[in-house]
Image (cartoon, grey):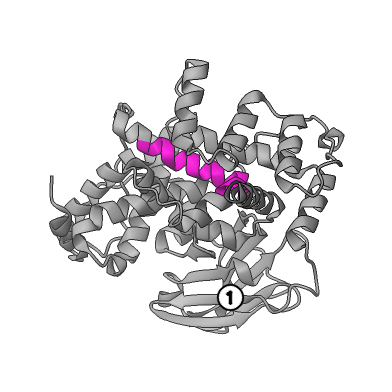
Amino acid sequence: MTDSVSLYHACLQDGSDAQIDAFKQLWNDLYRVSYRMTHHRADGAALAADCTQAALVKIYRNLAQCRDPSRFRGWAAQIARRVVIDTLRQPGYMRQVPLSDEDPGLMVVPMDVHGDLHALLLGAIQQGALSDRSRRVVIGRFFDERSDEELAREESRLSGEQVLPSHIQVTRAKNLAKLRRNTALIERLREYLAS
Amino acid sequence: MAEDRSQRIAQARRLAAVLVAVPDERACLLCLDRLDAYVAAQFAQDVSAHAFRDVMQHLDACVRCAESYALLYQGRVHEEEDVALPAHIPDPDLRFLVAAKPGAMPRVRTKTPKMLLLESLQVVGAQVRIQLSQALLSAFPPSAAALRGDTAPVVFDLVFMAPHASIARLRLSAVVVGDMPERWDLRVLIVLPERDWPDLAGIPLTLMLGETPHRALTDPWGEAIFAAVPAAQAMRAEVQIDILAL
């Protein structure tokens, strides 16, 4: 495998066979990077090819921005990953998983918390329409100050399945979004933060 | 006890701040720019809560970015697990490179017009970019329809549907200037989801001819014209739209 510095300099040699070979090598490397992010989709292979092609063009146009040729491979891989993310964020690509239909307006905002913001939030989480896991990952992060790696290990142990820190993050983001639908709670929080 | 109480208050305020946050496009872009470094730090078990606090807060506040983060993280996991690749990996299309030496024929993958159109579109940071190319223009032969009553020959007419969440439609077209086939008037028409005439005036557009930027503002219909562009440059031009300026 060609080292990063040699690969980088070959990519700069306009009109040469070395440049063509270098971009073919980049294609092979970056296709793997893209495919690992898209393989779970039915159109994963085609999407990986399209994203990698776009990444090659972007890399070619921005070669001068690679300030450290010894990190050229990593720099190129970062561009490929970003192309995949940007592509999948476009309308029609990102699967929109709807939040639960449970009415967040039924969540009670505790009134007898004597100005205790901590108790208010804990009450809203415990009384809200969240699953046990959802409560654990929200409370675990914000009140127990546990990392997502720790929370993932615990959830893996509880469920008997592999749970990644990224799963924990998405679960927490979605359930915080549910809490956000409790407009009475949000209004109370704004008052607290403004005071 | 006082320390416990102040810690509880700080924890609660952090959660409250995340709940009341309303992320905007700029916050998403800043987060996306740092996601790669954040995931790399996680895998190196070198995540400093302080260094990535803004990223972590945004991921809690924005489901869309949290899902992008999960995509990136899981990609790294699969990298370490060495996911099996498809039996056939296609060849790249290297025609974008400066022409190779005579006799050196890069293997070319046949692309549909739709693929060329999608490939010409990029979102880079807060910018939507359309890169024109000979291959793209050849894939879309000129339309016979006139533009707003013009009778000038239409060189090309490309339509991008929803190239970005903030843009409903983008149309790039070119007409020959008078009797000068080597000069084109390049037109860019933007249609936004919730704005209409005359509120489409003043959107800044940039046309890159090589390394030289040319700027124009849209009229009340959302159209800007770059007049008398040399055809050879227009064929390789790049149109840039700053999403944050919409």
Q: Is residue B143 visible?
A: no
Instruction: Let me know if residue B118 appears in the view.
Output: yes
Per the image, the residue denoted by label 1 is: B205
Asked if residue B68 lies in the magenta stretch, the reply is yes
Q: Chain of mark 1?
A: B
Q: Which residues lie in the magenta part?
A: B59-76
Q: Nearer the viewer, residue B192 or A66?
A: A66
Name the spot of residue A43 as percent of width and height, x first.
48, 33
Work out which quarter of the rendered image holds the C terminus of chain A and state it. bottom right
Badge 1 crowding class, 10 Å Cα cut-off, few under 14, some 14 to 19, many 20 or more, is: many
Tell me residue A46's x, y (percent): 43, 37
Residue at 48 percent of width and 37 percent of height: A148
Above or below residue B127? Residue A100 is above
Counting from the top left corner in percent of width and height, residue B28 is at 57, 56
Q: In the current view of this chain or complex, which residue is farthest to the front?
A: B1
Depicted B169 relative to depicted B246: above or below? above
Task: Check if residue A192 falls in the magenta segment.
Answer: no
Q: Quadrant of residue B83?
A: top left
Q: Closer to the camera, B51 or B83?
A: B51
Residue B27 is left or right of residue A176, and the answer is: left
At x 47%, y 22%, the residue is A156
Image coords of residue A185 (percent x, y): 80, 45
What amino acid is labelled 1 in the image? Leu
Please, is residue B193 above or below residue B3 in the view? below
- Quadrant assignment for the N terminus of chain A: top left
